[in-house]
Image: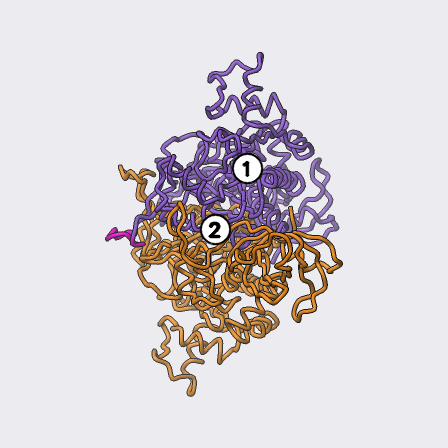
Chain colours: A purple, B orange
């Protein structure tokens, strides 16, 4: 296949003839020279192409922002600052124009190319998902997203974890995990699967089953919440990563989560340096430094009880919500713990049983469970996990206590009936991880096609 | 983390003390020695553990098939055939029993462990998805599946492709692509997204958008068909891989598909040798050899017209359906082409426009389109792809011809309005790929939780 601009820009310029394919970002016309910045999305940088407008047949009028071009020329050392090479154009073909103003055609009016101007609000771009990948910001996000997804697989595969596709359509109504989407066949005659079906909110229960067979598994797939809250923090459709480890307890789980986050940070620092520098400069000043420091130091570990103690110390507030043992931590509390108290990621353990899920293993104190949440600066909770209750009796009592019908959990309980083992796992929203690593503040800007209430662009 | 049995079996036995964690597959009791085969799902092989039943506190009665154990002992060279090492047990803990017969407990009757006997039909196992990963066959499938998924990512990442998560919930009703699942919020009051929404049948259209921004993208995500056909070839929920390449035509697309399949074959041959040998021996005799030969030779390439010519040659049949230009190829025809005619994979091109999708680019003959299907022995079509129509006028005429409302495809047509480029891509069902590489004949046995009409175990 032909070389990408990323590959061309990595070559030493030696007057070699090359063909560049991409989209024009900008055009500057001088007296005897036209400068085109051409980008193909393979990297943040564009390649500068210089052409003599007098030369045979070139029509600079068609070279508007957004036009697609195929350009052949010689790769020369560039006299310009900030770039090592540029392309001296010998032949140029416009593959597709991008009109600078509205135009009438046989296929109706074509509106002026919406991304002509250099800067667009992220709000505007959200309504143009089919084109926004061509901007610097969204292009950089999608490259980081891609590289990070690969890093997720590499991390777990290297540690003997099997990638598991847990089902998207499920009969489980996810007791208390929030609003669900229903799945029906389009005709609507009866239930397609013979019973009510939903979109999954988590692959954990199924991951536990395969961890009880393959020892170490991880999921990486889409999950869904039909929440009507329309905020910068929530999506109706998002991707989750959920490792589950048999024969492991809370300490192994914490170590895995910490190693994993550090691996993700290091991947972005190493593989996405140019994109990260862009985010640091334009989106979140200080980003690289804070990520580097998180990767280099051990995460602070404390119990929920200790955290509440820190939050109640004189001088810790003021908080809108008073920190109180037994209540969920609020964003402001998480912010204080990560940004002020620890100045980095924090792993909290031993939460009150009342505020955590039924499957978490009780601590000997009877009051707290073997949960672990990882909080990071800016975003707060990014990972939630626990050691699971692996004893049939203890799990059933806990479910009864909470009024959960054990009938609907027959398969899950079977894992405790047949060769049960201690096990632990955690879940992490992929989009929140990308937000942490890019500094992007609205979750809708880190997924190609964001889905939320009332919006389906 | 503690070592997996796969890692332990790769060690040289030097009387080192180790701890093994896993599930008992079989127990053989001799006069003074008990042999346990312990498996943890990290590889096909189990480790043999030998213990003296007279030694302190061991109760062989609890060591039934399916029980989970933690065993410490010394790794010694094994006198037995077919294994280099075995574990001489010094301490054994039963973590969880798997009762050999029905048992009454405080949590109700626990039925005898359903996987006690050595062989189970795949049909039986399908109804026990929470446990079937513990069998040799399903364990091997899931390990191959995991490794193959990683190989998919590696292949595309190494070639400059960006991994793209196309949306699962879509407003596109997928013109003619088959029955759809509807998505509604559980309450059901109005449309959650403000308009009708469905589960995706393909990420292609959205992948085209991001290919027109990042040049090379690939998807790997779940797709859905609400087909009522309950066969060994169809699932309601399956995973698809869809690369899309900007500035590429049909030839680059064919090369990519062929390189990709060969990469997948080589991955299984190299990374999954023991599992593949199992499939060769138990599931599909001759599998390894046929895969090796497919990886080593160029795929046969011919046009649809040439293929029909081959099928109509004297001696080619007899066929139930007469091969006829203009009609879809039937399984029997695909079988003949791959197994008799080419004795390996075949890439067919230039299909009649009438039997292919609206977005495929017309050939200059006006009768055929720049489609490419890859057929493989045993399974038939495994990849379907094409060069896409990138000209606005030609695409709109084609859509009008087929009665497709262009209104619903505004974003898709925008790609042809603004900097359009030649591009091509293909789609491949991940489960069919796994079937091809493992020899498994029923598609429900190559996905952890199969979903099909009337079945939601």
Which residue, as the protein is rendered here, is positioned at the far left? A189
Q: Residue at x 45, y 31 (%)?
A: A123
Q: Are marks 1 and 2 on the same chain?
A: yes
Q: Horizontal placement of A178 versus A310: left or right? A: left
Local crowd at mark 1 within 10 Å, few (<14), some, or many (≥20)? many
Residue under pointer 2: A209
Q: Is residue B362 at all visible to an observer of this figure?
A: yes
Which residue, as the protein is rendered here, is positioned at the far top? A314
Main SS of residues in magenta: loop
Question: Residue A73's x, y, as percent?
Answer: 66, 51
Q: Horizontal placement of A87 versus A207: left or right? A: right
Label 1 marks a residue whose chain is: A
Q: Residue at x 46, y 59 (%)?
A: B100
Question: Residue A372's x, y, as percent?
Answer: 54, 34
In front of the other: A353 or B48 = B48
Label 2 marks a residue whose chain is: A
**Which quarter of the figure has residue B359?**
bottom left
Q: Please report contact status of discs 1 and 2: CB closer than 8 Å, yes or no.
A: no
Q: Earlier in the sequence, mark 1 or mark 2?
A: 2
Q: Secondary structure at mark 1?
A: helix
Q: Is residue B357 above or below residue A76?
A: below
Residue under pointer 1: A433
Magenta residues, start to end: A185-194
Question: Could you give the CA–CA distance between mark 1 and mark 2, rounded to whole angstroms?
Answer: 26 Å
In front of the other: A376 or B189 = A376
Q: Secondary structure at mark 2?
A: helix
């Amino acid at each position: 296949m032909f070389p990408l601009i990323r590959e061309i820009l990595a070559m030493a310029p030696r007057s070699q003839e090359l063909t560049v394919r991409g989209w024009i970002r900008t055009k500057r016309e001088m007296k005897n020279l036209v400068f085109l910045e051409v980008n193909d999305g393979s990297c943040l940088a564009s390649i500068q192409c210089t052409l003599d407008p007098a030369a045979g047949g070139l029509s600079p009028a068609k070279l508007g922002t957004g036009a697609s071009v195929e350009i052949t020329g010689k790769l020369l050392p560039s006299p310009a600052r900030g770039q090592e090479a540029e392309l001296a154009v010998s032949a140029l073909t416009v593959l597709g124009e991008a009109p600078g103003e509205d135009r009438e055609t046989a296929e109706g009016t074509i509106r002026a190319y919406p991304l002509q101007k250099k800067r667009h609000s992220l709000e505007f771009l959200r309504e143009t998902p089919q084109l926004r990948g061509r901007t610097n910001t969204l292009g950089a996000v999608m490259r980081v997203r891609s590289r990070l997804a690969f890093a997720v697989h590499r991390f777990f595969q290297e540690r003997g974890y099997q990638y598991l596709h847990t089902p998207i359509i499920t009969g489980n109504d996810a007791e208390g995990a929030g609003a669900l989407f229903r799945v029906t066949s389009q005709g609507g005659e009866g239930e397609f699967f013979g019973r009510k079906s939903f979109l999954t909110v988590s692959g954990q229960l199924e991951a536990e089953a395969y961890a009880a067979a393959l020892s170490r598994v991880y999921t990486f797939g889409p999950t869904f919440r039909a929440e009507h809250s329309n905020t910068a923090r929530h999506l109706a459709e998002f991707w989750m990563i959920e490792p589950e480890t048999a024969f492991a307890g809370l300490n192994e789980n914490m170590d895995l989560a910490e190693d994993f986050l550090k691996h993700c940070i290091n991947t972005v620092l190493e593989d996405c340096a140019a994109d990260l520098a862009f985010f640091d400069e334009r989106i979140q000043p200080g980003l690289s430094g804070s990520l580097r420091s998180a990767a280099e130091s051990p995460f602070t570990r404390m119990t929920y009880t200790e955290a509440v103690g820190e939050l109640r110390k004189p001088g810790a507030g003021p908080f809108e919500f008073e920190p109180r043992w037994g209540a969920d931590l609020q964003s402001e509390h998480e912010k204080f713990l990560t940004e002020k108290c620890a100045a980095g990621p924090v792993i909290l353990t031993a939460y009150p049983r009342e505020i955590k899920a039924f499957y978490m293993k009780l601590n000997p104190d009877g009051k707290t469970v073997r949960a672990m949440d990882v909080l990071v600066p800016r975003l707060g909770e990014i990972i939630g996990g626990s050691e699971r209750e692996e004893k049939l009796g203890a799990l059933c009592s806990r479910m009864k206590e909470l009024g959960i019908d054990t009938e609907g959990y027959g398969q899950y309980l079977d894992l405790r009936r047949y060769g049960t083992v201690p096990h632990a796992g955690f879940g992490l929203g992929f989009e929140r991880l990308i937000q942490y690593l890019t500094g992007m503040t609205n979750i809708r800007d880190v997924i190609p096609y964001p889905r939320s209430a009332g919006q389906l662009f």
